[in-house]
Image (cartoon, grey):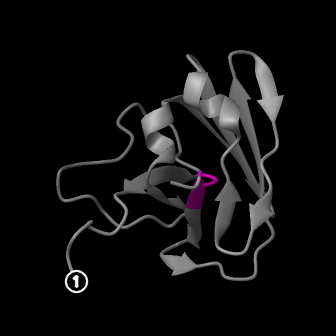
Amino acid sequence: MASQTPFVKLAFEADGQQQLDQEIRLAIEIDGKTFEPKIVKGGFIVPAEVQSGKQIKLRFISGKYDLSFGQMTKQHFDSEWVIGVKNPPFQEDPDGPLVSDGKDLRLIYYIEFRPHSAEGTK
């Protein structure tokens, strides 16, 4: 069986709208060493070092956004990613305020991991 280069499909959303033509950069820190994976249309090539990494951090840069995600695992690289940002004004949360200590919330950002298409189904 041929070896396949790991690829992560990546989408970027700002305020719920997919950013199709936005240039992105990634930096993946693996056990203290930084790698900049090759960005290809629709995602990126996963550095081989991810498989043996113990401590993995991700830095995502696009336009005015510079986002950091700590405590990643190698399993996160076996899924599709949606990285998103939400800018104010934020919709009210029915469960209560987003920030309760009197501070102003300036940005919400997240990474969503979606499993690859279900295997064996059509």
Q: From what the image shows, is residue 39 above or below residue 100?
A: below
Q: Residue at x 62, y 32 (%)?
A: 50
Specify the farthest residue to the front.
Answer: 1
Q: Magenta segment: does it hold 25? A: no
The mark tally for this picture is 1
Residue under pointer 1? 122
**Place of residue 32 in the rendered image (x, y in percent of width and height, measured from the top left):** 75, 16
Residue 42 in the image: above or below residue 59: below
Q: Residue 8 appears at what percent x and percent y?
A: 57, 58
Is residue 48 placed above or below 9 in the rendered structure?
above
Residue depicted at x 43% and y 37%: 75
Residue at image coords 68%, 16%: 31
The overriding secondary structure of the stretch rendered in magenta is: loop
Residue type highlighted by circle 1: Lys
Q: Is residue 87 visible?
A: no
Residue 71, visible in the rendered structure: yes
* Rendered location of residue 115, percent (x, y): 34, 58
**Position of 51 relative to 63 (above/below):** above
Q: Which residues are magenta?
A: 3-8
Instruction: Confirm whether the magenta stretch covers residue 7.
Output: yes
In the structure shown, which secondary structural element does the residue marked by tag 1 occupy? Answer: loop
Q: Is residue 48 left or right of residue 86?
A: right
